[in-house]
């Protein structure tokens, strides 16, 4: 009954598709939504009725149900484009027709998930999947944040190094500085800052895999005397530092902890 109700809600949502054409096949029956001459066309085959309840969770449920094999499509990119073009109307209708889900999501968002234990679990679930995996799609610096393409002909590695250089210049680093980096990644920033500017660097991560590779890279660069790699939550950092940097790790903090994060950053600066 729950799956059937969810299915009816989703079909009402699909009925709001405009400009594109979506074909849903379930148990041998085809259901067509949108105009026949739609600019985009995508077909979805449903393998389990559980998919409808999952889809009511929004993009997360859609993605997880796809990974679980509850549905498939002949054109995943086209389907995502179709959804993006109709996102505003679909999401607005989903919230109106499923108010209990919206209330539940709001309640869940109010529950902090990024305390020390939660943060370590979240980071481990992502970054501790294995360094070989990340090396398949990252450049040799293993930077997992936006690059700086100062010209269109730069390689990804060159653009990542350009970003690090820009950050170091903005920090006005020098040999007398002790830089604290919150969020080591795989050590690229720490190695770059210490090797090019001669400053001391203390960098921290709560990913065991990142910590191990960053430590190895520091050793290979002969920078053990300048760079210290910690396996420690930012809330447990002690001491004072002349400069502080944290590159695109703010999403890992969680908005409920922003005040704690920035207050502690302030306490750590001289």
Image (tube, helix red, strand yellow):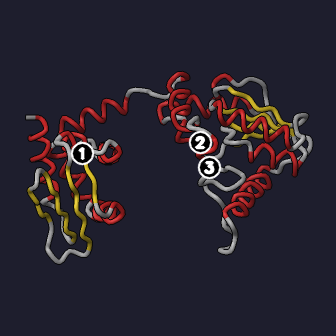
Residues at circles 3 and 1 in contact by the CB criterion of under 8 Å: no
Mark 2 or 1 closer to N-term? Answer: 1
Q: Nearer the viewer, residue 152 or 155?
A: 155
* Residue 64 picture location, percent across and down: 34, 43
Residue 144: mark in rendering: 3
* Residue 185 picture location, percent across and down: 67, 41
Name above or below for residue 190 compared with residue 159.
above
Name above or below for residue 105 compared with residue 62.
above
Q: Is residue 70 left or right of residue 15?
A: right
Separation of residues labelled 3 and 1 (CA atoms) = 30 Å
Mark 3 or 2 closer to N-term? Answer: 3
Q: Residue at x 73, y 63 (%)?
A: 158
- Name the secondary structure under disc 3: loop
Q: Residues within 10 Å of mark 3 (few under 14, many from 20)?
A: some
* Residue 244 picture location, percent across and down: 73, 40
- Name the secondary structure under disc 1: helix
Separation of residues labelled 3 and 2 (CA atoms) = 10 Å
Residues at circles 2 and 1 in contact by the CB criterion of under 8 Å: no
Residue 55: mark in rendering: 1
């Amino acid at each position: 009954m729950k799956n059937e109700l969810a299915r009816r809600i989703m079909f009402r949502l699909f009925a709001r598709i405009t400009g594109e054409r979506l074909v849903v096949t379930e148990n041998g029956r085809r259901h067509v939504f949108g105009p026949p001459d739609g600019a985009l066309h995508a077909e979805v085959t449903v393998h389990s009725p559980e998919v409808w309840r999952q889809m009511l969770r929004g993009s997360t449920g859609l993605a997880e149900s796809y990974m679980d094999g509850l549905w498939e499509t002949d054109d995943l990119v086209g389907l995502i484009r179709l959804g993006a073009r109709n996102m505003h109307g679909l999401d607005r209708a989903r919230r109106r027709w499923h108010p209990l889900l919206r209330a539940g999501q709001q309640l869940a968002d109010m529950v902090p998930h990024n305390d020390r234990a939660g943060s370590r679990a979240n980071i481990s679930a992502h970054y501790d999947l294995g360094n070989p995996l990340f090396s398949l799609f990252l450049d040799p610096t293993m930077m997992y944040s936006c690059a700086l393409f100062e010209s269109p002909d730069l390689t990804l590695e060159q653009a990542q190094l350009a970003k690090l250089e820009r950050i170091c210049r903005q920090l006005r680093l020098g040999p007398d500085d002790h830089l604290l980096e919150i969020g080591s990644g795989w050590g690229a920033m720490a190695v770059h800052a210490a090797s090019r500017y001669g400053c001391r660097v203390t960098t921290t991560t709560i990913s065991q895999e990142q910590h191990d590779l960053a430590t190895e890279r520091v050793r290979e660069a002969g920078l053990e005397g300048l760079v210290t790699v910690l396996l420690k939550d930012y809330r447990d950092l002690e001491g004072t530092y002349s400069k502080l940097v944290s590159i695109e790790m703010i999403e890992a903090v969680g908005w409920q902890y922003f005040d704690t994060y920035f207050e502690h950053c302030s306490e750590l600066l001289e």
